[in-house]
Image (cartoon, rainbow, N blue to C red):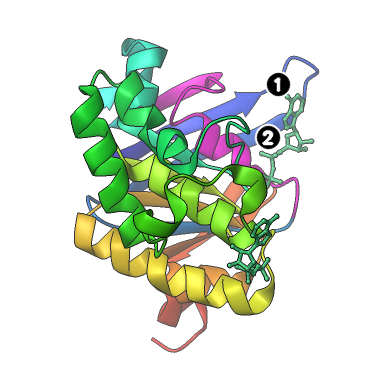
Amino acid sequence: MIRFEDVSKRYPDGTVAVDGLSFEVRRGELVTLVGPSGCGKTTTMMMVNRLTEPTSGRVLVDGEDVMAVDPVQLRRRIGYVIQQVGLFPHRTVLDNTATVPTLAGWKRGRARARAKELLELVGLDPAEFAGRYPAQLSGGQRQRVGVARALAADPPVLLMDEPFGAVDPVVRERLQNEFTAIQRSLGTTVLLVTHDIEEAVRLGDRIAVYGRGRIEQYDTPAAVLGHP
Ligand code: ADP
Ligand code: ADP
């Protein structure tokens, strides 16, 4: 579903963030990218939705070179969740969640109905939360809205950059478990960046272990932990 073919990225200041990367993520798979800060994980992810572009090599999504797809179209097909999700402060939880399907051209009624389904899925009862504003939510609840919004237009691919990094450890574990259940049921292909090896192992079907600009190991959690 996502394929990197000998991809390198050099930023204009000369920093080589990613160096000759080749790997593949199968449809419906959740792959975690793990490694220390500055080793190229976020750069890898941003080349999938063209927030940044490769210097050489190719990134394919569903068989198509991302450089051949209009970036706006591409981002409508690829969900994105970051550590501190930016919700629109003056829009309700429901309107925030319906934003992405609305931008994707869904009719208002269908977008709102789907948004309610997703809020339910992420554990926010629409009867209680749909009319709230972001300032009336806890940190964990805001991340839930971010996940609901990213999934509301049924993207085949979801990119997540430290999505649970800012919530406290107890809430984090609950969110992780709930999220993987949703991801399985929707069959979404996911790339998830984390610096936390425990999270990478808990969530990943496969784990890409990064060194500087390269993947040093790409395997199942059991193999990465050394229990083949
Ligand atoms: P990670 O996500 O693993 O922390 P990044 O992909 O953010 O790593 O960064 C990889 C390397 O590229 C780092 O050395 C970082 O400083 C550098 N880098 C990231 N973004 C830019 C940029 N816009 N311009 C120049 N260098 C950058
Ligand atoms: P979490 O464990 O999810 O981070 P918190 O301890 O931050 O939750 O919040 C506990 C409860 O208080 C939540 O149900 C949340 O909806 C509610 N809450 C938090 N902040 C506000 C606020 N500013 N206004 C109204 N309700 C709030």
The residue that appears at 78% across and 20% down in the rendered structure is 14
- Residue at (44, 76) in percent of width and height: 221
Crowding at dot 2, Cα within 10 Å, few <14 / some 14-19 / many 20+, comes out as some
Q: Would residue 156 be visible to someone looking at this image?
A: no
Q: Position of residue 208 (x, y in %)?
A: 50, 58
Up-down relation of residue 203 to residue 106 (above or below)? below
Disc 2: residue Cβ within 8 A of ligand 1's nearest atom: yes
Residue 11 tag number: 1
Q: Nearer the viewer, residue 18 or 62?
A: 62
Report the magenta residues as a range. 37-60
Residue 55 seen in the current view:
yes
As displayed, is residue 63 above or below residue 218? above
Quadrant including the C terminus: bottom left
The type of residue carrying mark 1 is Tyr
Where residue 15 appears, x then y in whole percent?
76, 27
- Return the x and y of residue 139 as percentages of the image width and height: 65, 58
Residue 142, which numbered label? none
- Residue position marked by numbered label 2 in the rendering: 17
Q: Are marks 1 and 2 in contact (CB under 8 Å)?
A: yes
Identify which residue is drawn at 60% across, 35% down: 43
Q: Is mark 1 within 8 Å of ligand 1?
A: yes
Question: Is residue 169 highlighted in magenta?
Answer: no
Q: Quadrant of ligand 2?
A: bottom right
In the image, residue 160 above or below residue 88: below
What is the distance, in whole Å, between disc 1 and disc 2 at their CAs? Answer: 7 Å
**Image-based side of 121 in relation to 139, left or right:** left
Q: Mark 1: give few (<14), some (14-19) or many (20+) Cα within 10 Å.
A: some
Q: Secondary structure at mark 1?
A: loop
Q: Is residue 56 magenta?
A: yes
Q: Earlier in the sequence, mark 1 or mark 2?
A: 1
Q: Residue furthest right?
A: 13
Disc 2 element: strand
